[in-house]
Image (tube, grey):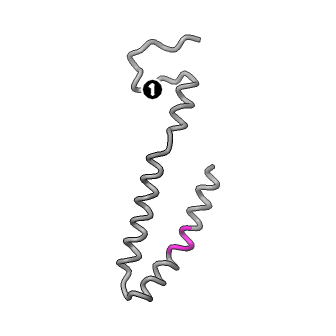
Amino acid sequence: MQCLQFRFCQIAGFISPFLVGSIKDKNGSTDLALYILSAVLFLGAVLVMRMPDKIGDRQHAAGVRQPSNLGSPPPKT
């Protein structure tokens, strides 16, 4: 999974300067390009926050105590 994430980061790092440059050439300003990049970053943050918490589910299944259940007795084995 981490390799896939790095691949998308590398693609974005390669493409975004070209997009900013082409939008600047057409409009004469980088404002629109930066607004578009900001919108894409915001959309990505919203999508990440909506993802289920797989790590928390895995820790709960392994019996790791979460802060929300510190007052409850440990799980029976």
Place of residue 57 in the rendered image (x, y in percent of width and height, measured from the top left): 53, 31
Dominant secondary structure of the residues highlighted in magenta in the image: helix
Magenta run includes residue 15? yes
The residue under the point 38% across, 88% down is 28
Total number of numbered discs in the rendering:
1
Place of residue 67 in the rendered image (x, y in percent of width and height, measured from the top left): 40, 26
Q: Quadrant of residue 73?
A: top left
Secondary structure, mark 1, is: loop
The residue under the point 41% across, 15% down is 72
Compared with 65, 7 (above or below) is below
Compared with 65, 47 (above or below) is below
Q: Nearer the viewer, residue 38 or 2?
A: 38
Question: Which portion, as a residue range, is magenta?
Answer: 12-16
Magenta run includes residue 45? no
Crowd class of label 1 (few under 14; some 14 to 19; many from 20; radius 10 Å): few
Asked whether, in this view, residue 72 is left or right of residue 77, the answer is left
**Residue annotated with mark 1:** 66
Q: Quadrant of the C terminus?
A: top right
Place of residue 2 in the rendered image (x, y in percent of width and height, measured from the top left): 61, 51
Q: Nearer the viewer, residue 23 or 71?
A: 23
The residue under the point 44% across, 88% down is 25
Q: Quadrant of residue 11?
A: bottom right
Place of residue 4 in the rendered image (x, y in percent of width and height, measured from the top left): 63, 55
Q: Quadrant of residue 62?
A: top right
The residue under the point 39% across, 87% down is 27
| Callout 1 amino acid | Gln
